[in-house]
Image (tube, rainbow, N blue to C red):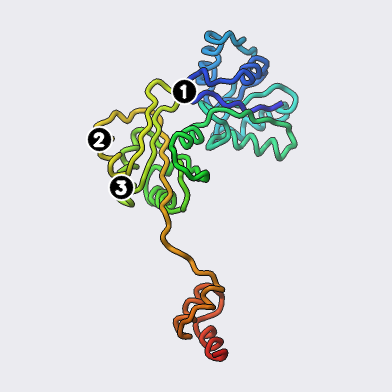
Amino acid sequence: MLTFIPTPIGNPQDITIRAMKLFEKAELFLCEDTRQTKRLLRLLEERFDMMYPDASFYSFNEHNGEERLEEFGSILGDKEVVYVSDAGMPIISDPGQILVAYAQENNIPYDVLPGASAVTTAYAASGFEEGKFLFYAFLPHKGKERSTALSEAMSNGYNTVLYEAPHRLEKLLNEIVILDEDRELFLAKEISKKYQRYYRGTAKSLNEEFKELNIRGEWVVIIKAQKSIEKSLSFTEVLSLDLPPKPKAKLLAQLSDKSVKEWYSELTQTT
């Protein structure tokens, strides 16, 4: 059986009893980082009396995922196989996606355990009232791709969750200030760890505040949706407007495959 197991994003006490039981009986571990996984297992052994598994450990990431599937694909359904990422929920913005796709394509049974997630934890802590949000993970690091992705995140109409590295957080705040200094943000630092902190305010106020703060650590940034003040008219609504034929034809042409000329002709024939 192939099982995807979430690991704590900070506090090791967030591990579940079910996860530890599966760790104990695992025969093969596929890990984003084997060193990180072994460190966690030793800690669980010392603090919570978990039995350290008699298992093999192999890295599994976006660079070697296909190679590992060729190596171990045939035994994924026969042995107790566990996949873990470095921290948090596997598969989400994670190379485990490759493994899930392989299991689906080859009818290999698999299970995903519920567990810690920085995305949902930060969103719950934000206090933003809307229940809908989009998750963008990490933005591109630089260039046009980054500016395009950020502009989209700022204007998609939904609260948007981002991950950001500490050395780029200042850059991100500066970029948001340029686009909309009054946009409300929520930032969560080091979720569930000793130095966990929450910050909420406008992009401008937080940008000023963070100039005096130590911004080391892992960050989740939530951009509050921009409230739309525009109303889009439907095709039917435009047809019913009391307008002269020419401006109405221009509007209808924008909403259909007919040209302005065709609409103008049709409107003048019916009046």
Q: Crowding at label 1, few (<14), some or many (≥20) Cα neighbours within 10 Å?
A: some
CB atoms at circles 2 and 1 under 8 Å apart? Answer: no
Measured as percent of width and height from the top left, residue 110 is found at 70, 31
Q: Quadrant of the N terminus?
A: top right
Image position of 84 with respect to 44: above or below:
below
Measured as percent of width and height from the top left, residue 21 is found at 65, 16
Which residue type carries mark 2?
Answer: Lys
**Snapshot quadrant of residue 168:** top left
What secondary structure is marked by label 3?
A: helix
What secondary structure is marked by label 1?
A: loop
Name the N-terminal-most of marks 1 and 3.
1
- Distance, label 1 to label 3, CA atoms, is 30 Å
The residue indicated by pointer 3 is 177
The residue indicated by pointer 1 is 10
The residue indicated by pointer 2 is 211
Which residue type carries mark 3?
Answer: Val
Name the N-terminal-most of marks 3 and 2.
3
Measured as percent of width and height from the top left, residue 85 is found at 54, 28
Which residue type carries mark 1?
Answer: Gly
Image position of 44 with respect to 114: above or below:
above
Q: Nearer the viewer, residue 90 or 128?
A: 128
Instruction: Give me the residue at 57% from left, 31% from top.
Output: 90
Image position of 248 with respect to 184: above or below:
below
